[in-house]
C-alpha cells in the first residue's frame, strides 16, 4: 500500500500549544500503553504500520515541519518537501511524482491520500487498505472515502452517492452548508468528505500533465513556486466522471478545535494541574513547570505553554483564530530533528533558551555574525567543537562563542543546556552553516 499523508497548517485554533512550526498534529496529548504521550502524527503512523507493516508512507509537507517530523517519526521517514505552499493539487502532484521518480513506484500501483490529523481507530486504515485495492482494480479513476455523518456539520463538504450500498458512484458534491442544508443532505444519504481518496499513480500524473508543463519530479520541484494555487477537489475530483465513494462507518473525528480535542483526551489534565471537586467537564494541558489550579470551572479548557495561556469556555474556544491572528511574537518552542528548544526569557539585547539534544544527535556546524553565545551544560554528556577544536563537555561546563566562531555540539547522552544569546540584532536569520568537521 502506498500512502501520502498530507501534513500542513499552523493549527492556530489550538493556540497556545500550536504555532507556525508545531502544528496540531505534533502536539503530544495521547497516552500510549507504556504511559508516555504521543502526537496525532505518531499515532497515525503507528496505526498504519500495524495494519500494513510493508506500506510505503510518504509525508507531504512544508520545510517548516521537516524537523518536527524527523524528531517524532525518525530520520528514515520518507518526506516530500514543498518548496512553498501552493494548495493541495500541486502538493499531491509533487508527492505522486516523488513516489515515481524517487521511490520507484509504478504508474499502475494505487496510491491513497490521507490527511495526517484525524482521530481514528485501526479500522479506519483497514478501510484505507480496501480503498487502495479498489483503486488498483481500475473500475473507477478515483475512489473516495465517505464518512457516515453523526450530526449535520457545517465544517465539512458532502458527497452524495447514487446508491446506499458500501460502494457507489458519486452523484454530486456539495460545499460546506449551513445546518439546515446539511440536514437535507443527510436525508439524501450524503456522506462527509474526509479528504481521503485513492487512484492509480499514472492517473494523477496524466491529469497533472494536462494542467502543468513539467518532465518529472525534479523539474516540478524546481518550478514549484510558479504553479497556480488550486485544490485537488477543484482541479480533479469534481471534474472526474469515473468516480466512486466507499462508505466508512467507523469512529472518525477532526480534532481541529479545543472542544473536539479535549473529547479525545483520556484524562482531564496533562502536566501539573489541580482541579477541585466543583469543576465539571474541565480539561487542562500544562507544559510549564508551575502548577495550574482550577476551582469551580465548568465546560472549560485551560492551556499553559511557552507561547501563552488560554482560559476559555469550550464552546467559545472554536472562535479563537481571529484573536490569535492579532498576536505577533517569535516562536517560543519547537521540536527539531536533533531535539528541541524552549525560549525562557527575551530582553532587548539578549535571549535565554533551554536546549535539549537527543542522544547521538548534533546541531549543524554554524556561526553567527551579529551575536555572541554562552552555553551552560546543565545535564548529560557530549562533545563540543569550536573553530575545529574539540572538547568533552558535561554538566557544569560553560562555553563562550563570540560572533564569527564556528561551533556545534554532539550529544552522547541526552544533553540539556542553557543558551544565552547576546547582541543587538538577535534573529533566526543570523546563522551561517559550515561543512561538518571530518574529525567529528
Image: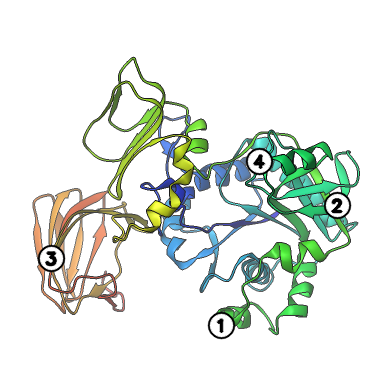
Q: Nearer the viewer, residue 181 or 156?
A: 181
Mark 1, residues whose alpha carbon is within 10 Å: few (<14), some, or many (≥20)?
few
Number of numbered discs visible in the structure rendering: 4
Mark 1 or 2: in front is: 2
Q: Nearer the viewer, residue 119 or 184?
A: 184
Q: Quadrant of residue 108?
A: bottom right
Q: Are marks 1 and 2 in contact (CB under 8 Å)?
A: no
Q: Are marks 1 and 4 in contact (CB under 8 Å)?
A: no
Residue 222 is tagged as 1
Earlier-in-chain disc, 1 versus 4: 4
Can you tell which of label 3 and label 4 is closer to the viewer?
4
Question: Circle 3 is placed at which residue position?
Answer: 348
For mark 4, does the 10 Å Cα neighbourhood hold few (<14), some (14 to 19), or many (20 or more) residues?
A: some
Q: Is residue 160 left or right of residue 378?
A: right
Q: Earlier in the sequence, mark 4 or mark 2?
A: 4
Spatial CA distance of label 2 from label 3 is 59 Å
Give the CA distance from mark 3 to mark 4. Answer: 47 Å
* Image height of 282 relative to 11, above or below: above
| Residue 303 as seen in the image, left or right of residue 263 | left
Q: Residue at x 84, y 64 (%)?
A: 240
Check disc 2 and report the residue beneath it. Answer: 170
Counting from the top left corner in percent of width and height, residue 253 is at 60, 39
Quadrant the C terminus occupies: bottom left
Which residue in the structure is indicated by mark 4?
153
In depth, the one of 373 and 323 nearer the eye is 323
Q: Distance between the Cα atoms at labels 1 and 4?
A: 40 Å
Amino acid at each position: 500500500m502506498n500512502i501520502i499523508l498530507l501534513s500542513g497548517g499552523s493549527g492556530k485554533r489550538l493556540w497556545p500549544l500550536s504555532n507556525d512550526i508545531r502544528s496540531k498534529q505534533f502536539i503530544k496529548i495521547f497516552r500510549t500503553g507504556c504511559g508516555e504521550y504521543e502526537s496525532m502524527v505518531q499515532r497515525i503512523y503507528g496505526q498504519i504500520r500495524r495494519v500494513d507493516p510493508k506500506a510505503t508512507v510518504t509525508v507531504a509537507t512544508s520545510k517548516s515541519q521537516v524537523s518536527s517530523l524527523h524528531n517524532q517519526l525518525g530520520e528514515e521517514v520518507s518526506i516530500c518537501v514543498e518548496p512553498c505552499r501552493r494548495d493541495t493539487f500541486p502538493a499531491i502532484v509533487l508527492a505522486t511524482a516523488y513516489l515515481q521518480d524517487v521511490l520507484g513506484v509504478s504508474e499502475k500501483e494505487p496510491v491513497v491520500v490521507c490527511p495526517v490529523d484525524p482521530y481514528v481507530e485501526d479500522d479506519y486504515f483497514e478501510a484505507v487498505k480496501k480503498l487502495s485495492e479498489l483503486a488498483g482494480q481500475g473500475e473507477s479513476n478515483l475512489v473516495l472515502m465517505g464518512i457516515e455523518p453523526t450530526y449535520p456539520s457545517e465544517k465539512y463538504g458532502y458527497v452524495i452517492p447514487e446508491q446506499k450500498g458500501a460502494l457507489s458512484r458519486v452523484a454530486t458534491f456539495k460545499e460546506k452548508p449551513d445546518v439546515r442544508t446539511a440536514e437535507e443532505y443527510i436525508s439524501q444519504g450524503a456522506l462527509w468528505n474526509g479528504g481521503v481518496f485513492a487512484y492509480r499513480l499514472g492517473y494523477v500524473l496524466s491529469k497533472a500533465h494536462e494542467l502543468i508543463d513539467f518532465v518529472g519530479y525534479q523539474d516540478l520541484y524546481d518550478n514549484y513556486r510558479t504553479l497556480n494555487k488550486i485544490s485537488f477537489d477543484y482541479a480533479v475530483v469534481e471534474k472526474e466522471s469515473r468516480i466512486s465513494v466507499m462508505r466508512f462507518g467507523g469512529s472518525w473525528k477532526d480534532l481541529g478545535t479545543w472542544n473536539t480535542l479535549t473529547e479525545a483526551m483520556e484524562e482531564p489534565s496533562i502536566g501539573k494541574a489541580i482541579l477541585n471537586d466543583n469543576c465539571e467537564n474541565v480539561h487542562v494541558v500544562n507544559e510549564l513547570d508551575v502548577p495550574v489550579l482550577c476551582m469551580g470551572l465548568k465546560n472549560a479548557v485551560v492551556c499553559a505553554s511557552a507561547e501563552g495561556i488560554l482560559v476559555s469556555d469550550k464552546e467559545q474556544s472554536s472562535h479563537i483564530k481571529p484573536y490569535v491572528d492579532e498576536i505577533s511574537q517569535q516562536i517560543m518552542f519547537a521540536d527539531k530533528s536533533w531535539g528541541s528548544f524552549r525560549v525562557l526569557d527575551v530582553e532587548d539585547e539578549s535571549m535565554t533558551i533551554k536546549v535539549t539534544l537527543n542522544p547521538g544527535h548534533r546541531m549543524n556546524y554554524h556561526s553567527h555574525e551579529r551575536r555572541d553565545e554562552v552555553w551552560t551544560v546543565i545535564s548529560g554528556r557530549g562533545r563540543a567543537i569550536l573553530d575545529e577544536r574539540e572538547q568533552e563537555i558535561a554538566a557544569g561546563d560553560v562555553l563562550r562563542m563570540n560572533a564569527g566562531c564556528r561551533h556545534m555540539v554532539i550529544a552522547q547522552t541526552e544533553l540539556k543546556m542553557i543558551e544565552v544569546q547576546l547582541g543587538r540584532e538577535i534573529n533566526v536569520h543570523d546563522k551561517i552553516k559550515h561543512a561538518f568537521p571530518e574529525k567529528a
